[in-house]
Every structure is written in structure tokens, then in C-alpha cells.
Image (cartoon, grey):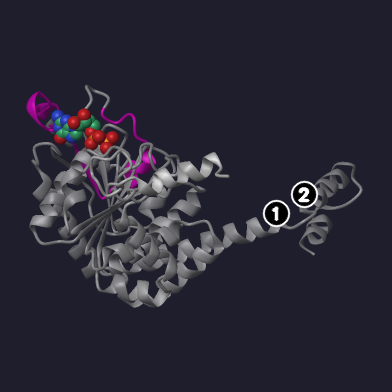
Amino acid sequence: MKTPNEDIGKKKEDADVTNPKSALSVNPGVADAPAISPYIRDQRKTLSRKEISAEELAAGILSGNRTHLSKAITLVESNLEAHNDKAQAILELVMPKVGNSIRIGITGVPGVGKSTFIESFGSYLLEQNHKLAVLAIDPSSQRTKGSILGDKTRMEILSKSENAFIRPSPSSGSLGGVARKTRESMYLCEAAGFDTIIIETVGVGQSETQVHSMVDFFLLLMLAGAGDELQGIKRGIMEMADLIAINKADGQNEPFAKRARVEYESALHLFPAPESKWTPRATTCSGIGGKGIDEIWKLVLDYISTTKTNGYYAKNRETQTRMWFEETLREVVLEQFFMRPGKKEAILESETKLMSGQSTLLKEIKRLMD
Ligand code: GDP
């Protein structure tokens, strides 16, 4: 006896599956789209399968490979120990090619026009066949907030140019940590052949001092205010400036900017003569109009040649490196001391003993050091 199922099976076999009109015919299908773009997948393969060695990255950087430069900077910025070790290995390899650039720090309050100025100044430098790297130091910012690439429209020309390299501020870390990352990134850019480095500080605060301690020339951008020109920026920052540029000197603002320039110039004379023997100047410029940009570059070159001749240029770089080393050493030693297990309790114990007169200061310090 046949089962009903056998009958159905027979009917299926009899059906003409090759007839395109048959409801049972099978049309050639379209392959499923890949879950991820094959282009990205291939890139992933090369990235994950073959990790680029420190030697290869260093060689790439020295030949001007921007992808390798970016990767190395990512290693410098990483908080993972393995990444840092690799970054240090790269730095060691490229160190002989480091130092051949003009390092310029640019600072000013938010809204003074720093990014517009850097776009204009940078474009001018590119026209003169320079290779420019722009780095930012801003410990308060996160990568997407307030740092130089946070707003995509900022520095549009530079970000598209082959001869410019823009890197936002490292996303996190203490000021000292961010400063180290920025300085090492600067070294890598120099090794990659960038002959001019701009380090921008976003905002006002301690980061100006950090930038000042890693550049040759420090430019302070300011705005003309009605009568209160000297306010809004700390005296210490003005004292560090090699040049003060009154920005937005265009349209109706131009006469105010010119007046402010005269006032700043006389204010600068009140500061003690700097060790560089360079007399800090004040000038006017317009980032939007490009006015005064060439004059500022001329002043930078003038400063470099003056300080190279009088020996300050080399001496300053040596001092900067020594201070950087000493500061970092101090930071690391302190961190290691306080991070040791049981340290917190031991400190509390010493404090209690001291307060109750049970012990002496040096005795307790010796105990903690031991
Ligand atoms: P930052 O915060 O210091 O980087 O300043 P921005 O470059 O973002 O500029 C802040 C505002 O000032 C923007 O609206 C710019 O369009 C404007 N601005 C920048 N430079 C100039 C300039 O040279 N002249 C005038 N009139 N406005 C400018």
C-alpha cells in the first residue's frame, strides 16, 4: 500500500522544475551581500594577521609614510604598556632624524581665531613648499569635543593637503602625560620630514607652560578690546610670548587692533629682557583675510636666525629636554612611591604618630622610604 507521502514525493519529481514558468522552478539567485565591505575586510586581514613591527614602522616614518606615522602616534598615545614599549622602540630608531624643524607654539583664548589662523598661516607655509604638522595639547578635551579635529570644518585646506598632517590632542591623561605624548608625536612628525611643527593649545590654563617648554617660538594670539587690552590673559603667558599678534585686524576692527598693538608693544617692554636676547614684538593680523601672515612668518625666521647666531636656540632645546626628563622622572618616582601596596596606611600611621608626638618627622620619613 502506498503512503500519501510517497504520492506527494512522486508528484514533485514529475514537476518540470526547469520550466521558467513553473512555480517550482528555481531561478539563479543573487549572492548575499557580504556583511562587511570586502575592502575593509581585506584591510583588516592585513592589519590583524601581520602586525607591523617597530622596525617597519620606523622605516615607514623615515620614508614619509603617513599611515605609519599615524599608527606610531597611536602607539605613543596608548595607555597599554605593550604599545608604549613599541612606541619607545620606534622613537629610539628614528631619534637621529629628530630635531630638524621649527617648532611653533600657538595659544590664545577660545574664539580668538586660532584654528582659522593656523589654516591661513599653514596654507601660506605650504605655498612656500614647507611640510607642516599641527598637533594640539589640551588635557581637558576628549577627541570629539573641542580638539582640533572635533569640528570637521576646521582647517579644511590643511586636512586635505599632502604636505600637512593634523593630529588632535591625545584624548585623555594627566597634563604631564598629554605633554609627553604631544612631544613624542612631534618627534615622530619631525622624523617623517615635517619641517615646521605647530603646537596649538586650546583653552587657557597650565597647558601653555607645557607647550612653551617644547617649542622654539611662542605666539600669543589676542583680540583688541575697548580699553581693556591687557585683560583676559595672564601676565605669565604674555611674558612667555615671543610675539603677540592682535588677530581679527580686519573691517571695522582694524583701527582698534592697530591701537591695541601699540599698547601691547609698550607693555612688552616692561618685562625683563628675555634670555633669548630677542625683543618680543606685537603685530596685527587677520586669519580670515590672510593679512599679516607673511610678516609673522618673517618674524619667526628672524627669531630663529637671531637665536641660532647667539647660541640660545640650541641651549634652549637642551634645557627643555633636561627639564622634561627631570619632571617626568619626578612624576614617575612619586607615582611609584604612592602606588606601593600598603603605602596609604603607612602614611596615615606616620601622620597619627606625628600628631600625637610619638615620633619625629625624619624618623617617619625614613620609615616610609624604607
Ligand atoms: P579658536 O577657538 O581660537 O580656534 O577660534 P576659531 O578659529 O574657531 O574662530 C572663532 C570665530 O572667530 C569664528 O567665528 C571665526 O569665523 C572668527 N574669526 C576667526 N579669525 C577671524 C579673523 O581673522 N577675522 C574675523 N573677523 N573673524 C575671525
Q: Mark 2 belongs to which amino acid?
A: Lys
Which quarter of the image is occupied by the N terminus?
top right
Rendered image quadrant of residue 144: top left
The answer to whether mark 1 and mark 2 are in CB contact below 8 A is yes
Q: Residues within 10 Å of mark 2 (few under 14, many from 20)?
A: few
> Which residue was labeled with disc 1?
338
Residue at 22 percent across and 52 percent down: it is 279
Looking at the rendered structure, the secondary structure element under dot 1 is helix
Kind of residue indicated by mark 1: Phe
Q: How far across and down, in percent of the image, does residue 33 sit?
A: 32, 48
- Tell me: 44 left or right of 263: right
**Can residue 197 be seen in the rendering of this structure?**
yes
Q: Which residues are magenta?
A: 229-257
Characterize the local packing of mark 1: few (<14), some (14-19) or many (20 or more) Cα atoms within 10 angstroms.
few
Q: Which mark is residue 9?
A: none
Q: CA distance from mark 1 to mark 2?
A: 7 Å
x then y, percent, for residue 53: 42, 74
- Residue, disc 2: 344
Q: Nearer the viewer, residue 112 or 309?
A: 112
N-terminal label among 1 and 2: 1
| Label 2: element kind | helix
- Along the line of sight, which residue is nearer the eye, 86 or 259? 86
Q: Residue at x 34, y 30 (%)?
A: 232
In this view, 316 is above or below 288:
below
At 30% from the left and 38% from the top, the residue drawn is 23
